[in-house]
Amino acid sequence: MKHSNIPNKILYWYDKNKRNLPWRKKTTTKNREYFTLVSEFMLQQTQVKTVIPYFVSFIKNFPNLKSLASAKEERVLKIWEGLGYYSRARNLKKTANKLINDFDSKLPEDIEALMSLPGIGEYTSRSILAIAHNKPYIPMDGNVERILKRIFLLKKKNEIYKDNLNKKKSFFSFSKRSSDYAQAIMEIGAVVCKPKLPLCNLCPISENCKAFKFKDFVIKPKDKFNKTKYFEANVYSYKNKYLLIKNKKFNFLKNFFIFPMTEINKRKFNHSDYKKINVKISNMNMKILIKKNKKLKQIRDSLFLDKSNMNNYILPSFTKKIFNSVSQ
């Protein structure tokens, strides 16, 4: 398959069609590195449209590496609140501190050094090297995978495993504009080569695509594993205030306030007459019974909170959902 002109086609399309994303705006090298770092952390397992308002708010509150490193963790988590996967926020702050202390406030320019930073793995390190440092890397995200699967019409398990897809990346070749090129390929996957109903008439490389040639655009979805767990939330109220305790149950929500909860089995959940809610967090589907209790308990590391003061504390989504359910 001839692909010597692929970079020119893709970059021509990108220059005319790229989205106006806040982390792409022209700025100083130092700011570009910081914007790339923050956006790449936020974009881990989260869609662009969801990230945009959080990125804008985060940069407003922590405009540079120094302000992030010196901030209290509680404030960082509060600004991050609602974006989920809170370990990303903790790791981002740890990385800011490490960059200041060990790397002269600069993002390293090699994979090994980047991967030594908290929360940065192979994919994020390659993204940072390409976007912030113009290194010739093409990060393999879901968008790039989908393009390659359609270009080569890859369907079978032995065709779509990671090593084979990485070999197929040679199709893209390289460009001196590595930063733009990496973003351009991901951009095509996000806005043109969509999972369903791809916009092939807008694609700059459709003539190179077997899926387009044979009109076969179906992509085998990845197997997703989301655990379903069942809980009973105990609600204690006093004068329109509700008892919350400091979380010790969920490691990824360290020190957040939650309702007292116990894990139960599916049978108890299904046979209960208590009000029920469903919440998805990380890779877990939470099914929660809401049990109102009349007798108050004395519990350490607890507080009574009314709905008007919710925004003063860092509360996970399921705590807010329970709060809204019982305080209506």
Image: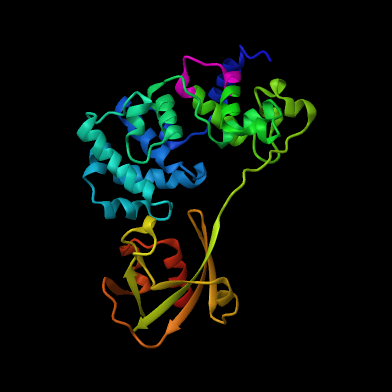
Q: In this rendering, is residue 210 above or below 252? A: above
Image coords of residue 121 (percent x, y): 41, 36
Quarter-of-image position of residue 296: bottom left
Residue at x-position 43% and y-position 47%: 53
For the residue pair 169 and 7, the one nearer the viewer reads as: 169
Magenta span contains residue 35 = no
The N terminus - image quarter: top right
Magenta span contains residue 172 = yes
Residue 27 visible at all? no
The residue most toward the bottom is 295
Q: In this rendering, is residue 139 above or below 7? A: below
Is residue 261 found left or right of 105 in the rendered image?
Answer: right
Image coords of residue 109 (percent x, y): 34, 23
Residue 303 visible at all? yes
Q: In this rendering, is residue 189 above or below 206? A: below
Give the tally of numbered discs. Answer: 0
Image coords of residue 308 (percent x, y): 35, 71
Is residue 50 found left or right of 297 in the rendered image?
Answer: right
Quarter-of-image position of residue 270: bottom right
Q: Give the range drawn in magenta.
A: 169-180
Image coords of residue 35 (percent x, y): 36, 35
For the residue pair 194 and 264, the one nearer the viewer reads as: 264
Query: Which scheme is used to colour this image of the protein?
Result: rainbow
Is residue 71 found left or right of 264 in the rendered image?
Answer: left
Is residue 30 found left or right of 292 in the rendered image?
Answer: left
Residue at x-position 52% and y-position 16%: 174
The residue most toward the front is 158
Quarter-of-image position of residue 92: top left
For the residue pair 61 and 300, the one nearer the viewer reads as: 300
The residue most toward the right is 214
